Image (cartoon, helix red, strand yellow):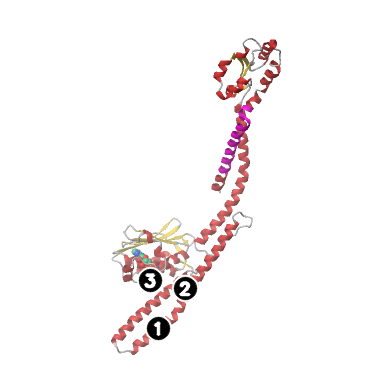
Amino acid sequence: MNRLFFRFFVLVMLSITGATFVIYFVFARLFGDPLDDIARRQASAQIFLLEQYVDQAPADEWLGRLNKVREVSEAQFDLVPLDQVRKTLPGRDLPALERGAIVLDPANKTFYRRVDLKGERYIGSEGEAIRASQLPIDLGQALLMEVVRYVVVALALLVPIALWSRQHWRALQALSDVADEFGAGRLAARATLRRTDAVYPLAERFNAMAGRIQGLLEAQKTLLHSVSHELRTPIARLEFALELLADRTDDPALAKRIAAMEGDVAELEELVNELLSMSKLDNAQEAQRALFEVEPLLQECADGLHPRPPRFGLELGAHLGSIDGDRRLLGRAIGNLLRNAQKYAAGQVELHARRDGYQLEIAVEDDGPGIPDEDRERIFEPFFRLDRSRDRATGGFGLGLSIARKAVALHGGTLVVEPSALGGARFVIRVPDGVVAA
Ligand SMILES: Nc1ncnc2c1ncn2[C@@H]1O[C@H](COP(=O)(O)OP(=O)(O)OP(=O)(O)O)[C@@H](O)[C@H]1O
Ligand SMILES: [Mg+2]
């Protein structure tokens, strides 16, 4: 809210300031300097006296009237040589002075005027000028009034702009919340804005896009699930048939061949089972939630690791607490991380767990080759495996990490990989409070 409001307000104020200056310069060009105009108005009494009282006198009384004015006026009137005035005034004022007009010098609160052009008032009067100083000119006050006007306009604009930006900010915030929710995997999230909201068309498009993405993902999941499911029956039949065939043959070469085929079919079955469990994970309802303690689960995962790496470290912090979730799923995810670590480690694997503020952190690290920076996200994609020649020997389909990440996400947590201090990879599961009970 603050950002939108502040930027818009600054923009409006800058525009008003800009417009004020443009108006000033345009007026100065077209109608003369507005400040000069104000000064002339402030000195209008003295100008009036000079033009209407002193100048209206016959030539022989002119000086007398001027003297009378000098007595009564607060401004100081005196006669100065014209040449001196010509030197004092800037060049742009000289033509007006020569014409016999009143020339103002607001900064010095003074004006000048030639006594007359033809020397009619008294001898030598054409070579002299009247200087009226200490005039009641106060441009500071005029400028202060302008500033006050500016501030009042700014304050008056502040309220509508604040209301306007609050409304927009709320709508944008609502939209960005929905985008976050959708991005976090809740595909049913939709923006519910009012038709009158300025960003309503944007929300409508977002909802249409979200609908299409949800449809596509669901179709893909259904396809994966159905294909895996449909493959199970022919695989079971093949298994059965191969077993029958193996029983009936006496030919050792054929028996060897059949055994190899049985191995392939078993691998296929494993793949289908993995795919099925992955597609089930996309469905949050499949998780069997219950409250279970973290420490025994980690202990079981560690115990279930065969063969044990030469150096295996288990470090469990105090008060790991309990998780309200699916124990089997989380155990499988941790088990996969441990098996990966064992597969790729040079000799050392560590399993650490601790409570870090409001979350539970479980880390599995090893001293193996690690994961290159550019593949840190890709290894969580299904079937993605690094350096195929290396991995073929280690077996696996490249589904383990993708399944583990989905299982952790079902618990509202995250699974990321980072470099380990041991030299290899460090996989970290973080489960926030709310699913973790102390
Ligand atoms: N601890 C690790 N050190 C180095 N590379 C790793 C480590 N863990 C995973 N990887 C890389 O990430 C890839 C994906 O891992 P993932 O667990 O998804 O598949 P997998 O172990 O190859 O097969 P699966 O788990 O399906 O049997 C692995 O093939 C491997 O290249
Ligand atoms: Mg694996």
Q: Of label 1 and label 2, which has the lower sequence position? A: 2
Q: Which residues are magenta?
A: 9-37
Identify the image quadrant of residue 17. top right
Marks 1 and 2, how far apart at CA: 21 Å
Q: Determine whether the residue tagged by mark 1 lies in a helix, strand or loop.
A: helix
Check residue 305 for magenta coloring.
no
Q: Is residue 349 visible?
A: yes
Dot 2 or dot 3: first in sequence order is 2
Q: Is residue 48 above or below residue 345?
A: above
Q: Which residue is mark 2?
A: 224
Q: Is residue 12 magenta?
A: yes
- Neighbourhood count class around disc 3 (C-alpha, 10 Å): few under 14, some 14–19, many 20 upward: some
- The residue that label 3 is drawn on is 397
Q: State ligand 1's quadrant.
A: bottom left
Residue 283 x, y percent position in the rendering: 50, 69
Which residue is at 44% across, 79% downward?
232
- Residue 288's spot in the image, x, y percent? 48, 70
Splitting the image into 4 quarters, where does residue 363 fall?
A: bottom left
Q: Residue at x 63, y 25 (%)?
A: 39
Q: Which residue carries the number 1 mark?
A: 238
Residue 75 is situated, as x and y percent measured from the top left of the image, at 64, 18
Instruction: Name the amino acid type tagged 2.
Output: Leu
Q: Are marks 1 and 2 in contact (CB under 8 Å)?
A: no
Q: Residue type at mark 1: give it.
A: Leu
Q: Main secondary structure of the magenta part?
A: helix
